[in-house]
Amino acid sequence: MFEIDSSQLRFSLAEASKLLGGRHQAGLAPEDLSQLHGKTEGWITGLWLASVALDHHAEKAEFVRKFSGSNLSVADYLLGEVFEQQSEKVRQFLLRTSILKELTPGLCNALVPQIESAAILQALSAENVLLTLVEGEDQTYRYHSLFASFLQSQLRRQSPDAVAALHLQAARWFAAQDRPVPAIDHYLESGELSEVLPLMSRHIYSLLAQGRMRLLGRWFDKLPPNALRSHPALKMAQLWTLCFTRGPWAAMTALNISGLADSADEDVWPHVSALRPVLFGMMDRQEDAFEAGRRGLARLPSSVPFADGALINTMSGVFSMRGQSFEALELMSASRRAQSENSSQLHRMYAETMEGTLDLFAGRIHEAHARFRTAVAATIAEGRKSTGGNAWAGLLYALTTYERNEIAHATDLLRVYIPQTRNIGLPDHMIQGYRMLSRIAFLAGDVDEVYRLLTELEALGHERQLPRVVTSARLERSRVQLLQGHSIAAQQELARVSDDAAASRTQTFRLAGNDVDYPLLAKLRWEAVSGDAATAAIALTAEAAIAFSEQRRRRGLALELVLAVALARSGREPSALIALESTLRACHRQGFVRMVLDEGPPLGVLVRQLHARATAASSVSRDVTFLGYLTNLREGYGSTLPVAAPDPSQQTVLLDRLTEKEVHVLHLLAEGYSNIAMAEKLGVTDSTVRTHLRNINSKLAAGSRMQAVSAARRLGIVR
């Protein structure tokens, strides 16, 4: 005999997919399947009932979104097969405790007096009545989510007036146990403001310092509009929360109408002094942030350590942006000293992020990556994944992860943090996040997704009145067009930002989103690849010297990579290879990978030559670690590099006429589309695309995709 617990009776996601697929659930997207599996928690009966109901709904995603224990088929099953099979005493226990996210004997006794809760919980768990023992917790249970929503629906139907009273009893029990978070949750559900507001006042700033923004946002959303009128400190906490959950514009509007902007209250003005520069900085109004922050610094210290720390951290970033590194480091030191006296996870996160950003500007990828990882961990509760931390540090952690060419991990991080940074409206984070996602899409051959992401970024810039975001989207679009060989389109896109006021700010200030992707470098890259390469080489040399003199090593290295392209194209290939080897050795030491690979084939052909030279060197003179780096770069370019120049004596000949469809496939191939993306674009299967490619290779006497494109370009079939 074997004992089988409830976890072994649950379907995995793969098993749920088989069940639903077997019922021909066409149109159920992977994310909808995952959401449905999460709601049913793998409960086989729940999955089956959902699959039956899905047959009658055209809008699958909407059905999954609304699916709960109150769904008619689920409710009928739970009512007849589970709820009505219990005794009246147990049914009352189930209803009254359904409001709880966790069930312990003591808490249940508070809600259902004169009953032995421990015995009932153990019996229900033993009978597998959709009750689960919480792993790692002693005598702590929870209801299956569908069963909980069913019970709550029954409670509201049978005893609507009891709901608020039960929440109030639960809140008081948690408060007595010194557990303020669940206590406040239940107080807000009960509507008892006279008890919840004092409790919130005692704990709100410790939670704010921990970075619990979404939790606080949920609480403040549940309060009536004028509930905080006589609680100015809580109102300021609400404004901080608004800033980090809905963005600076919502917070600034709320501050202006709050009546607290010019308050002299000792518990209020320090927050206003700190909040204003934060909001201006997030709005990309750096000059206003500097002036407001400078006035705030003159009033330090105040009686509010949280606000002082926020102001110091913000102004360290502002000074760094202005190139005043000494002042920035001085403020960071002050922030570190303050942390030792008044520990704050949020301030630790921000301080580590700022120091990591300075490392990034200085070209120290390894150090920056370590700091960003530490910053993310500073706001993660024990046992949670690295995607649960603060988006401010999280997206920069994704940036260094991407730079290290850890594409899968970077993609996972970006999927979590980009929605958060977009909702908040952080300009540099949005620029860097969308840029990385578009480049990852280009690597995957999904060209349509590349342009969709850049169009979305540009639209966000217009919508949020952030000209630099618009400029950055256009710069990246121009870069993609240049990689596709559309030099005229790339030049026209650059012309749209040449006189842009936002473009000049990328030269004046140290802005993380435009450190190595800024208008002047984009213009010089175009000249190096498609224009006057010799003149571009002179300008690149001068610009790189300025960058290195300003300790902007990352920018300097990026300029030197493009310089190598310009030198080679202007007929100075030996000089180009010498210069490139020196630059790549520096990139190797500092940990740069994607910055090299993202320059594409114009640089890749030079890397290939260096790799061949290093491979041919004698074992005595060979630098093994540098050769390994070059090998990784060579492999990173993959099949994107053009084939070696053909023998002039062997003319490219078209062995058979290409069909119209094959010419179309060649054009898509030249623009970087993958097989899957081409199949979707053409409305055919992947095997059909492969057939077209085999025919193309045969007719062009080519052995690979890139050989076929090169041959087609020599014949003038594609540009």
Image: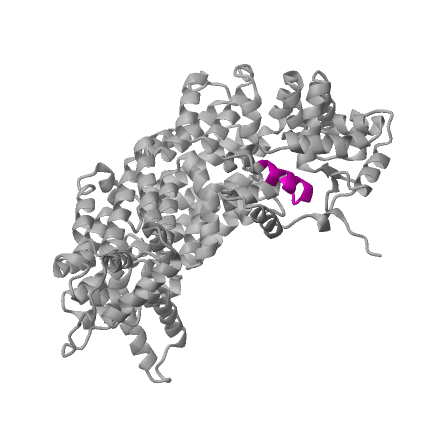
Which region shows up in magenta? 40-53
Image coordinates for residue 202, horizontal then vertical, percent: 63, 26
Q: Is residue 21 visible?
A: yes
Image coordinates for residue 268, horizontal then vertical, percent: 49, 22
Residue at the image position 46 percent from the left and 56 percent from the top: 408
Residue at the image position 77 percent from the left and 49 percent from the top: 5
**Main secondary-structure element of the magenta-colored stretch:** helix
Placement of 429 over or under 544, stated as above or below: above
Query: So how many labels did they put on this image?
Result: 0
Viewer-proximal residue among 580 and 706: 706
> Splitting the image into 4 quarters, where does residue 584 fall?
bottom left
Q: Is residue 364 visible?
A: no
Placement of 545 over or under 330, stated as above or below: below
Image coordinates for residue 41, horizontal then vertical, percent: 65, 43
Viewer-proximal residue among 656 and 575: 656
Question: Which quarter of the rendering shows the C terminus?
Answer: bottom left
Question: Which quarter of the rendering shows the N terminus?
Answer: bottom right
Horizontal relation, residue 37 to residue 462: left or right = right
Q: Does the stretch in magenta take in 143?
A: no
Give the colour scheme shown: one colour
> Splitting the image into 4 quarters, where does residue 243 fall?
top left
Viewer-proximal residue among 652 and 223: 652
Image coordinates for residue 298, horizontal then vertical, percent: 40, 30
Horizontal relation, residue 125 to residue 301: left or right = right
Q: Does the stretch in magenta take in 50?
A: yes
Placement of 665 over or under 290, stated as above or below: below
Viewer-proximal residue among 143 and 428: 143
